[in-house]
Amino acid sequence: MNESGGLRIRRLHRPQVITDELPENRQKGSSTYSGKVFQVTLLSLGGFLLLPLLVIILILESPIQPEVFSLKEPPLMKGCWEPNLKLRGAQRLFEDQIIGPESIANIGDVLFAGTADGKIVKLVGQRIHTVTRLGKPPCGSTDDEPTCGRPLGIRVGPNGTLFVADAYLGLFEVNPTTGEATRLVSGSQVVAGRKLSFINDVTVTRDGKKVYFTHSSSRWQRRDYLHLIMEATADGRVLEYDTESKELTVVMENLRFPNGIQLLPDEESVLVAETTMARIRRVHVAGLNKGGMDTFMDNLPGFPDNIRPSSTGGYWVTMSAVRPNPGFSMLDFLSQRPWIKKLIFKLFSQEVLMKFVPRYSLVAELHDGGICTRSFHDPNGLAAAYVSEAHEHDGSLYIGSFRSPYIAKLELSKV
């Protein structure tokens, strides 16, 4: 027998480690490990991105120092406040030809308004004429406002002149024919220890001897109005200017954003929109109750702006933001949470925040006793946005805006 024929081939067996782990479990374990690596990486990346943000939040000071205040539960949107689309029937006038016509007055059929670029304009037919400019150019941005001026409230006096409240430059009397402007009260001056940083609306007695105006804040200017609302600063006032003695007197103080103002027929009281508090106050400026104040209408469904007389003996009040009920009101929610307000203003600018404020235009007619008799709505502000005033003339409401590029006209006979 060959030697080779007797060879036997032996296979070497490697020792095996016996475990309970099946092949699929080994694969799963590998997958679990990868998942953990991914989670750790993701958390590390998140921490890397969030750390600078947290540092900014802790280091940066908030521009506002909010006060805690309380609002009542908003009224139900029913009855007179029932939502409708009546304001959608408004027609836009001078669209893209006029910017931010906050307040409107008329002499005959000629309308007058102050605009965001610092002008007092006259609207005749379909044409716009500049009456005067109270400040100096450049104009057109919020940075320019303190020198350019920002005319807000406007009224016609007994002699056919215009009384104009400029947020920065002061109180003026303007000749609508010649454009001559006389400054009655200088803006930014200190009155009774407080600076006139934000002059707002104006109303004049029938004889023109007394002029009342709102001073919205000593701390904030008009361009920072959202800071004023969110901070709820109670440093607003009502002042009286005597056109004969030139004396300037504080009538009422410690109001939260006093805005629109309107003399009552007896001229012993003025109605004042206290915007932050969603109410209208009655301030007694003459007579036995002089120096006193009570509430004309409390707990409005929105934040009131200007107040103007209606032909039925009531008052037109505009609101550009509402407190929906049923629904959710962000400003009501934040009123009790100042720390959230401070955080928000650390992270976002006023312009960015304005984009998150739901647009809802509301014009209401109110009568004595705080009675709402009718209201016109435009949800989302599709026809008339950012409404600031409703001026009634010849059967129509001419609706101003603090930032829209038009005046809206609503014929009352059609609603």
Image (cartoon, rainbow, N blue to C red):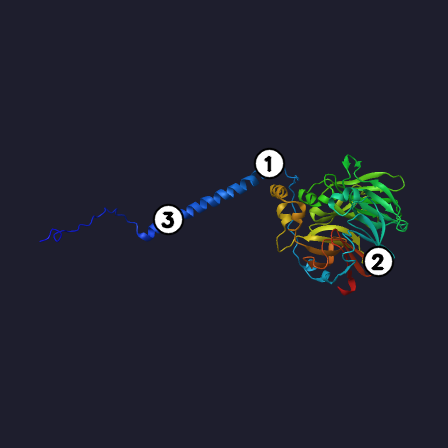
Q: Identify the amino acid type marked 2.
A: Arg
Quadrant assignment, res 51: top right
Compare marks 3 and 1 and give the one earlier in the sequence.
3
Q: Which type of secondary structure does the marked residue at label 2 adopt?
A: strand
Front in this rendered view, residue 343 or 12: 12
Q: What element does badge 3 sit on?
A: helix
Q: Looking at the rendering, in which quadrant would you find the C terminus? A: bottom right
Residue under pointer 3: 30
Label 2 and label 3: CA atoms lie apart by 78 Å
Name the N-terminal-most of marks 2 and 1: 1
Q: Position of residue 138 (x, y in %)?
A: 78, 45
Q: What is the three-letter code of the residue carrying label 3? A: Ser
Q: Is residue 268 visible?
A: no
Q: How many marks?
A: 3
Identify residue for label 1. Answer: 59
Q: Residues within 10 Å of mark 2 (few under 14, many from 20)?
A: few
The residue furthest front is: 2
332 relative to 21 in the view: left or right = right
